[in-house]
Image (cartoon, grey):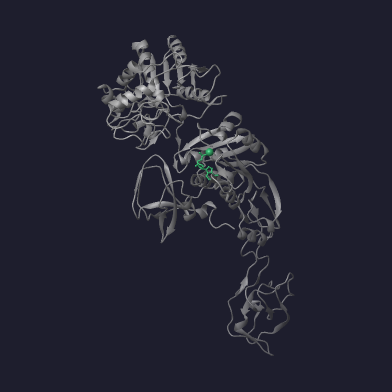
Amino acid sequence: MFDLILVADWSAAAKPTGPTPRKDAIWVCADLNGAQTTTYFPTRAKALAHIDGWLGQGHRTLLGFDFAFGYPAGFAQALTGGDSALDVWDWLSARVEDGPDNGNNRYDVAQDINSLFPGVGPFWGRPATLDLPDLPPTDRARADHGLPGRRAVEDVVPGAKPLWQLAYAGAVGSQSLVGLAALSKLRARWGEDLQVWPHQSGWQVPEARITLAEIYPSLWPVASAPIKDQGQVIATARALRRATPEWFTGPGAQPDAPRIAREEGWILGVQAAGDCYALPPGVHWTSVEDALATLREASPCRVGVEEVPLDQATGRILAAPVTAARSHPPAANAAVDGWAFAHGTLAPGPVPIAPGRAAAATTRAAPVPPGHALRIFTGAALPPGVDTVALQEDASATAEGLHLRALPKPGANTRPEAEDIATGDPILPEGRRLRPTDTALAIAAGLGRVSVRERLRVGVLSTGDEIIAPGAAGGGIHDVNRPMLLAMLDAWGLEAVDLGHVPDDASVLRATLDGSDVAAILTSGGASAGDEDHLSRLLTTEGSVQHWRIAIKPGRPLALGQWKGRQIFGLPGNPVAAFTCAALFARPALLQMAGAGWQVPPGRDVPAAFSKRKKPGRTEVLRARLRDGHAEVFASEGSGRVSGLSWAEGFVLLPDGAAEITPGTPVRYIPFQDLGLGTVG
Ligand code: AMP
Ligand code: MG
């Protein structure tokens, strides 16, 4: 859509950021028909001059800045008397002084604004040394200023910080104050050639040669680059290359859309779906079904075959179908204790008794002469010439012979040869994980050894500087995930390998990954894209990683990566989300890698014992259990509640549409048993 894409990562620094490229400074990526150049700037003035240079080349241009272009509802009107964000731009431009050396008066301007509003605020946050009584140092000191905390777009973009905060970690307010003053001047310089989306264009692609739009680099996984900010502008420019007119439709058709366009603005690339979810195109939320389909493709069997004796085979996965090596039973035999004879040969009266007896043995008794009966015991192979057994309770042996109270039917009380299994019958399929009963069947069918898959070795590591060993004293978070995940792997019959805990340090993480002798690794924590996440960063720069924002709650991003031949599942740090993602996504992929084929339990519909109004746009997984045939759910859906995991005996899975659930509504229940996580021994 654009020949030139300019992406600016802005900064409100009050001094030049120095000659050496660094983070938290201004970076601009210029992408001209796909060829990118990324430049660092120590001051805003230099960056703006550079941008003006590009704009002067006459290309059809998209120019993006990563700060909010508008403020929450009511601010523009109260401050300027006009109702557009552009009125605020001009108001700020007339008051913000921003020198060529970055020196600026933003805190004074914020205090002036605050003094125009009732109560205390809306702006807050300043260096303690500044004497500005109308600019409160803390959020809590604010009161009664009458303005909302957020813009509409900030409700759909997770992690966006409110604009009123000017200082301290993560603050974005200062960038807008100095940035909007600069944009007002930029507009003045470029006149009709430039249109601001959506304030001037509404929810469509501006017609002017230059489109100016708000962007948010955290929507996209950081590209590999020595400095994060640099990687972010590169990734954002790449993402914007894929823009379609749909990207400019903002919140879509809703009553408030014209006001949002005029007053608040929107982040380019964020689209609202349903009433709750932002779907940045190009990142888009992956549905559970799509995620599973991709995992299925991406996780072929990764292990070899070995032969093991059947007494060591339970729990292992069959590498080939098993067929019966001999029949079961191998010969016709007696089902009861009693008397054996050939039914058609008996004469009326007492039956002569043949000498000897037939008991369970590895050899067969001698033939029984026609008309004779032989004492026989359960399990004994029928001797030649015999086809029927009379129960011992129905017969009495006397000196004249055997008296039968009633003549049984021909063939009575015998088990025919191969009644259960015939030689060559298929008895167990490839991929079957052998249960004790399966081993029993294979042995009964004459097998001594079976071909099984080598065990898939799966490593587990925890990341995070805050993580401490279970039971350790002191501040920190006890490592819940690693023992839990190791035990889950064990329950699935995989060879769980403890790779320990790794601090947020790329070189330790690299060494741990390199040193692991495993086919796959489950990690927890540090897997998000865009924050200080070493796992993501390392995989991005030295391995490969794909971030999925799976439309599931709980879930957060799930990362799927590769590290030198090892498949990496980057699970969320939160134990509830880690458990859920491991059970629903890692399990089928790992089992397929282990040779067990693809298996996702379907669950079954049961009546709900709870009420819930579910929003559309994502699958929700609730911790649940069955009582009296009804699915109860844990009192809190908070994904920090480990207590709900232990309470639960299964999941209730609510598919991605909207739903109004009341007691009795059918819901899909998946017992942990079906996920291989029932009772474990
Ligand atoms: P992260 O994904 O690293 O941002 O972590 C999200 C949350 O999960 C944070 O509150 C972490 O402290 C917590 N967390 C991360 N790893 C673990 C773990 N192994 N056990 C328990 N909590 C964890
Ligand atoms: Mg962490």
Where residue 247 sits: x, y (%)? 39, 26
Residue 410 sits in quarter: bottom right
Q: Nearer the viewer, residue 339 or 348?
A: 339
Residue 69 sits in quarter: top left
Residue most extreme to the bottom: 399
Where residue 483 sits: x, y (%)? 58, 49
Where residue 302 sits: x, y (%)? 64, 41
- Could you tell me which residue is drawn at 62 percent across and 46 percent down? 595
Residue 432 visible within the image: no
Work out whether 387 lies above or below 482: below
Q: Nearer the viewer, residue 89 or 192?
A: 89
- Could you tell me which residue is drawn at 55 percent across and 53 percent down? 676
Q: Nearer the viewer, residue 173 or 286?
A: 173
Q: Is residue 585 left or right of residue 198?
A: right
> For the N terminus, which image quadrant?
top left
Work out whether 140 lies above or below 667: above
- Could you tell me which residue is drawn at 33 percent across and 16 percent down? 94
Work out whether 101 lies above or below 599: above
Residue 159 visible within the image: yes
Where residue 341 sits: x, y (%)? 66, 78
Total numbered circles = 0
Residue most extreme to the left: 81
> For the C terminus, which image quadrant?
bottom right
